[in-house]
Image: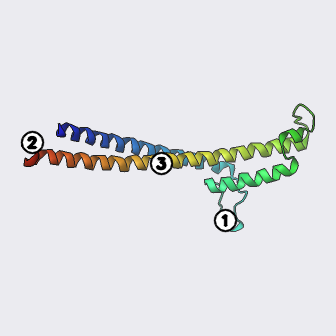
Amino acid sequence: MVRKLALLVLILGLVSIAIGGVFVSQGVATKNLLVTALQPEKITLGIPSDKLAEGEIIDTAKEAQIAADTIREHRHTIAPTYGDLLAGSKHFDPTDPTQLTYTTALTLEDYLYLAVLGFGVTQVVIGSGVFMIIAGIAFGGTGLALLQGSKSPETATK
């Protein structure tokens, strides 16, 4: 009975390690995809001048958050809300430069906040994967200990 339990725990450990590896690799791949998607946009809002000279662009959650918050502040100087922007009119007027600027800022702000969310999700996925790998190693060690214990002469007589 102990031998079967030991094998079950070992298998659980191996499965946990494999799934954890998939989580880590998917998290890293998705993070790389986000960075690759942000690079062609060459967004530099909020990047310090010395880093701009080195060619730094927004490619992290923190940088995207700073830029999105800055755009939000600037957008709110145009109008505090979208309803205030329309000022009683019921429809968006794409020929109005103020409304067009506001919605363009809103779109870029949303794009950057979505990047922040994406980076956060990748961190959670990578962290979950690492935890699964650690748990798998612990299960594997426990399974091996149980297996070794089931082979000892003391347990063989019980």
Q: Amino acid at mark 3?
A: Ile
Quadrant where the C terminus sits is top left
93 to the left or right of 31? right
Q: Earlier in the sequence, mark 1 or mark 3?
A: 1
19 or 6: which is nearer to us? 6
Q: Is residue 144 above or below residue 11?
A: below
Q: Which mark is first along the chain, 1 or 2?
A: 1
Residue 93 makes an appearance in the image: yes
Residue 123 percent location from the top left of the image: 52, 49
Task: Name the image quarter holding residue 96.
Answer: top right
Secondary structure beneath dot 3 equals helix
Instruction: Sort mark 3 into few (<14), some (14-19) or many (20+) by Cα contacts within 10 Å.
Output: many
Label 1, label 3: how far apart the Cα atoms are: 28 Å
Q: Write down the residue under mark 3.
A: 126
Image location of residue 13, percent across then percent down:
31, 43
* Residue designated by label 1: 51
Q: Give the structural element (helix, strand or loop) at label 2.
A: loop
The residue carrying pointer 2 sits among few (fewer than 14), some (14 to 19) or many (20 or more) residues within 10 Å by Cα, namely few
Q: Which residue is mark 2?
A: 158
Q: Is residue 37 visible?
A: no
Give the image location of residue 11, x and y in percent.
Answer: 28, 39
The residue drawn where x is 82% and y is 53% is 74
The CA span between labels 2 and 3 is 44 Å
Residue at the farthest right position: 88
Helix, strand or loop for disc 1 = helix
Q: Residue furthest top?
A: 90
The answer to whether the residues at label 1 and label 3 have Cβ atoms under 8 Å apart is no
Q: Residue at x 77, y 52 (%)?
A: 71
Q: Quadrant of the N terminus?
A: top left
- Judged by depth in the image, the label closer to the viewer, 2 or 1, is 2
Left or right of 157? Residue 105 is: right
Instruction: Identify whether 62 is placed above or below 49.
Output: above
